[in-house]
Image: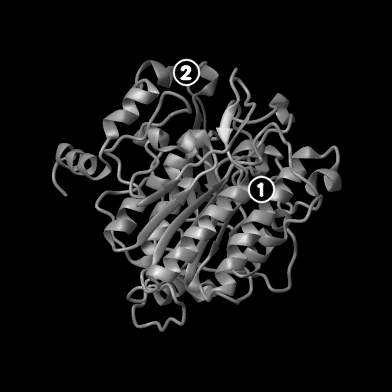
């Protein structure tokens, strides 16, 4: 790969104005020394993936029974992965390149696992998410390693802990060019790469455009945000999804044989909860539930597009929450301060071509946001030049007993 200095120079020449990111965000803080003293952290020891039940937490524990439930062993999942990455596997989709599947990564901010139907939530309809789980792998126990938007997404895209990728909080931090994102590796493998974000925290100035040929950050509205005087730029999920679908339509028209890696971020479930109609009226005073229902509707728009355009059977779809939401449990209104299930337990669902149309598969292994990048690359057969902090969730060497580190630097403020 060459030295880190050489890699940084190459990436700066590709992105053009990476120095502008540092200037506009006021530089980057070091993640060491004094900050470590201020860390609020918890080290979670997971035995067979059940990391929270001894604390009496309910997230991930209230699971819906299903006659179609299968407990997938690591070897069975590895066999399925081998089929998914087999270049001789025929494809009838219009968006394939050399047998490689497309990838759609959907990240949702502030999405609590226990407020999703397939995770035991029974107070609202999450039909699109539940349908995704019925055809894929739903990890009953999944967690974020940091309950803050920017560092959590940096972890999802790099497969590294915040201490290793350098983004410890929102605000002055940015993802350095020296870190390789999963988008860069997909792009190097010949994929068309695109991203559609809904939050100011995820814009290009913070380093999130690395590896994306198309990076759409057209934030069309402002909304109050906890701790900030000025309203925060963002955009409604329906506008983000519409932009993503337009790109997919153009891609299929202009280059249908080239596989794509597309990331869509939905930010609507963040406080304050102001969902549009008819969701606001349907859920009345339950404003957070209204936002979750609205987000589920947008996810359904994406999955329906894949189905209606012949892409479903050749597209890996990953749905993962970047973090949960306190909702006043343990005295926390939103997220970022405390490390309870309410803010760190997230939904994580994988739909892959080999499981398309098959019954839901559940696994009790503990999954984390550090696992998204290595698992995606393993599923499509793209090697990584550097090691990950996370695991390939469908790998043969996946150990059901693992330790996952969780942190938050927000209490230092």
Front-most of 115 and 282?
282
Front-most of 229 and 70?
229
Q: Is residue 363 visible?
A: no
The disc, 1 or 2, on the residue closer to the chain's N-terminal end is 2
| Image mark for residue 215 | none
Distance, label 1 to label 2, CA atoms, is 28 Å
**Label 1: few (<14), some or many (≥20) within 10 Å?**
many
Q: Secondary structure at mark 2?
A: loop
- What residue lies at 41% left-to-right and 19% top-to-bottom? 35
Q: Is residue 286 left or right of residue 238?
A: right
- What residue lies at 77% left-to-right and 56% top-to-bottom? 125
Quarter-wise, where is residue 235 in the image?
top right
**Pointer 2 residue:** 38
Q: Is residue 28 left or right of residue 14?
A: right
Q: Is residue 142 visible?
A: yes
* Percent position of residue 141, x then y: 60, 51
| Image depth: mark 1 or mark 2 in front | 1
* Percent position of residue 49, x then y: 56, 52
* Percent position of residue 390, x then y: 41, 49
**Pointer 1 residue:** 113
* Percent position of residue 135, x then y: 61, 70
**Label 2: few (<14), some or many (≥20) within 10 Å?**
some
- Is residue 46 shown above or below 311? above
Confirm or deny contact between disc 1 and disc 2 (CB under 8 A).
no
Q: Is residue 283 left or right of residue 194?
A: right
């Amino acid at each position: 790969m060459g030295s880190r200095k050489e890699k940084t120079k190459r990436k700066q020449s590709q992105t053009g104005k990476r120095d502008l990111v540092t200037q506009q965000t006021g530089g980057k803080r070091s993640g060491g020394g004094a900050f470590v003293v201020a860390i609020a952290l918890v080290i979670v020891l997971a035995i067979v993936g059940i990391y929270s039940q001894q604390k009496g937490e309910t997230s991930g524990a209230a699971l819906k029974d299903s006659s179609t439930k299968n407990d997938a062993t690591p070897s069975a999942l590895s066999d399925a992965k081998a089929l998914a990455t087999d270049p001789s596997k025929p494809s009838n989709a219009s968006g394939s390149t050399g047998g490689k599947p497309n990838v759609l990564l959907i990240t949702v901010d502030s999405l609590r696992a226990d407020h999703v139907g397939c995770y035991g939530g029974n107070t609202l309809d999450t039909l699109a998410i539940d349908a995704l789980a019925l055809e894929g792998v739903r990890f009953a126990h999944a967690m974020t390693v940091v309950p803050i938007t920017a560092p959590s997404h940096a972890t999802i895209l790099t497969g590294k802990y915040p201490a290793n990728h350098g983004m410890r909080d929102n605000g002055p931090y940015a993802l350095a060019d020296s870190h390789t994102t999963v988008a860069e590796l997909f792009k190097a493998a010949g994929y068309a790469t695109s991203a559609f974000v809904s939050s100011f925290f995820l814009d290009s100035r913070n380093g999130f455009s690395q590896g994306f040929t198309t990076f759409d950050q057209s934030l069309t509205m402002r909304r109050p945000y906890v701790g900030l005087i000025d309203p925060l730029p963002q955009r409604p999920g329906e506008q983000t999804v519409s932009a993503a679908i337009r790109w997919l339509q153009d891609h299929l028209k202009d280059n249908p044989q080239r596989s794509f890696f597309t990331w869509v971020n939905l930010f609507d479930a963040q406080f304050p909860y102001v969902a549009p109609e008819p969701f606001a009226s349907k859920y009345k005073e339950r404003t957070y539930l209204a936002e979750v229902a609205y987000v589920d509707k947008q996810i359904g728009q994406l999955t329906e597009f894949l189905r209606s355009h012949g892409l479903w059977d050749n597209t890996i779809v990953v749905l993962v929450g970047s973090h949960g939401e306190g909702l006043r449990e343990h005295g926390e209104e939103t997220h970022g301060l405390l490390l309870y299930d309410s803010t760190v337990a997230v939904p994580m669902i994988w739909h892959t071509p080999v499981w398309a149309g098959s019954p839901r598969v559940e696994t009790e292994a503990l999954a984390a946001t550090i696992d998204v990048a290595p698992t995606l690359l393993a599923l499509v057969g793209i090697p990584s030049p550097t090691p990950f902090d996370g695991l390939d969730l469908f790998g043969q060497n996946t150990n059901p007993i693992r330790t996952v580190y969780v942190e938050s630097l927000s209490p230092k403020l």
